Image (cartoon, rainbow, N blue to C red):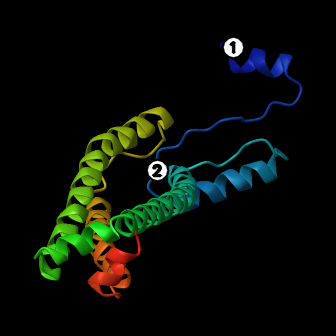
Amino acid sequence: MYVNENDFKKVVEKPYIQKLIVDTTDKNKVAKEVKNLNGKYNNPYTQVNSKQMYINEARKFQSSLNIIGMSAVFIIGLIGVLNFVNTMITSIISRKTEFAMMEAIGMTKKQLKKMLLLEGLYYGVIITFVNITIGSLSTLLGYNIMQLRFSTYTYPVGSLITCTIALFLVCLIVPLAVYSSVNKDSIIDRIRVTE
């Protein structure tokens, strides 16, 4: 409802400014003037909000969101790595006799290590493919669901490259480390364990 100033003063006993929009380059001067007006007219209701204040609030929210998100990613990643390590340990221990028999018929340790490296590489390629397809779609979907103010979607290329490198290192190092720890006995002892 729009009313002229004189009629408004007749209806409202103590008028006050509730909202004032000012386009200025000197935001500090405007904030001081509004505070002076509030003090002069004893008006506690007028608030000073600026674009910078909204940007600062968005940055605080973004940093807390980053902390929560990175914590969740770290925990999920740690669970994934431990699951992979457990899977590789179980796989190599259960195939310990198979590896010993392959060595007994002429396969060298170098060829066995190459086979385990390729197996780890396959795991890394599959995980990277899933991460790039489903992971990318889920981050975009999550951003669209949240619809954050003052933010734009940027694809995390740097994080993706870092995680992919770490993933391939884990996928290549873990099988070799597990095989080296399991492969300390002689071929005959490893074959004899199952008998």
Q: Which residue is mark 2?
A: 24
Classify 194 as above or below 8: below
Q: Earlier in the sequence, mark 1 or mark 2?
A: 1
Q: How many marks?
A: 2
Dot 2 surroundings within 10 Å: few (below 14), some, or many (20 or more)? Answer: few
Classify 174 as above or below 129: below
The residue tagged with tag 1: helix, strand or loop? Answer: loop
Question: Foreground: 5 or 156?
Answer: 156
Dot 1 surroundings within 10 Å: few (below 14), some, or many (20 or more)? Answer: few
Residue at the far right: name it.
13
Q: CA distance from mark 1 to mark 2?
A: 27 Å
Mark in front: 1 vs 2 = 2
Residue 33 in percent (x, y) is at 65, 55
Q: Which residue is mark 1?
A: 3
* Amino acid tagged 1: Val
* Amino acid tagged 2: Thr
Quadrant containing the C terminus is: bottom left
